[in-house]
Image: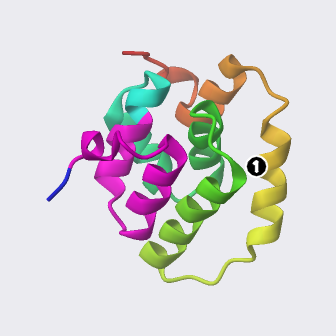
């Protein structure tokens, strides 16, 4: 089994897509945590949680393009076996690009969980 560092040869966004498409939530969380300098357990909670906003905020902090975030959304939908209209979520992700990093961190982790590594 490969680890997030095994994807160092690929651009970051491609590694995210590969991990998300393989449903490797924990590895994806570690990769995003490395990029964002956030605790990996907090990132896992954000990307695996019920609400999509924390996952979107972590992905935005990591600087992911829309297609990489879309892969994360697809993973979340497969894990939850639910039908979701992706267009509002993708539009909301675009709007997050206007927010400063401190606000994104609050959205991603909640004000009481912000603890950079």
Q: Is residue 57 above or below residue 101?
A: below
Q: What residue do we see at 46% from left, 29% from top?
A: 35
Q: Does residue 56 appear left or right of residue 46 in this picture?
A: right
Please identify the quarter of the rendering in which residue 38 is found: top left
Q: Position of residue 4 (x, y in %)?
A: 29, 44
Is residue 21 located in the magenta-colored stretch of the structure? yes
Q: Which residue is drawn at the image coordinates 84% and 56% (left, top)? A: 91
Q: Quadrant of the C terminus?
A: top left
Q: Is residue 116 magenta?
A: no
Task: Please tell me which residue is depicted at 44% across the width and 69% down the height of the picture.
Answer: 21
Image: 89 above or below 105: below
**Please, is residue 117 above or below residue 56 in the view?**
above
Residue 113 percent across, percent down from the top left: 46, 25
Q: Is residue 64 above or below residue 114?
A: below
Q: Residue 1: x and y, percent?
A: 14, 59
**In the image, 92: left or right of 9?**
right
Residue at 33% across / 46% down in the picture?
A: 7
Range of magenta residues: 3-32
How was the colour assigned to the protein in this rendering? Answer: rainbow
Q: Which residue is mark 1?
A: 93
Secondary structure beneath dot 1 equals helix
* Tag count: 1
Question: Going by the image, does 33 lie left or right of 99?
Answer: left
Of 10 and 72, the residue lying toward us? 10
Q: 35 or 85: nearer the eye?
A: 35
């Amino acid at each position: 089994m490969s680890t997030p560092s095994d994807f160092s040869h690929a651009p970051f966004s491609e590694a995210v897509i590969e991990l998300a498409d393989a449903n490797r939530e924990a590895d994806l969380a570690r990769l995003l945590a490395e990029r964002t300098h956030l605790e990996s357990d907090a990132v896992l909670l954000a990307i695996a949680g019920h609400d999509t906003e924390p996952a979107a905020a972590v992905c935005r902090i990591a600087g992911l393009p829309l297609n990489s975030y879309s892969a994360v959304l697809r993973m979340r939908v497969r894990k939850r076996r639910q039908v979701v209209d992706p267009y509002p979520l993708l539009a909301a992700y675009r709007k997050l690009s206007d927010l400063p990093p401190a606000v994104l961190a609050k959205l991603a982790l909640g004000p009481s969980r912000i603890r950079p590594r």
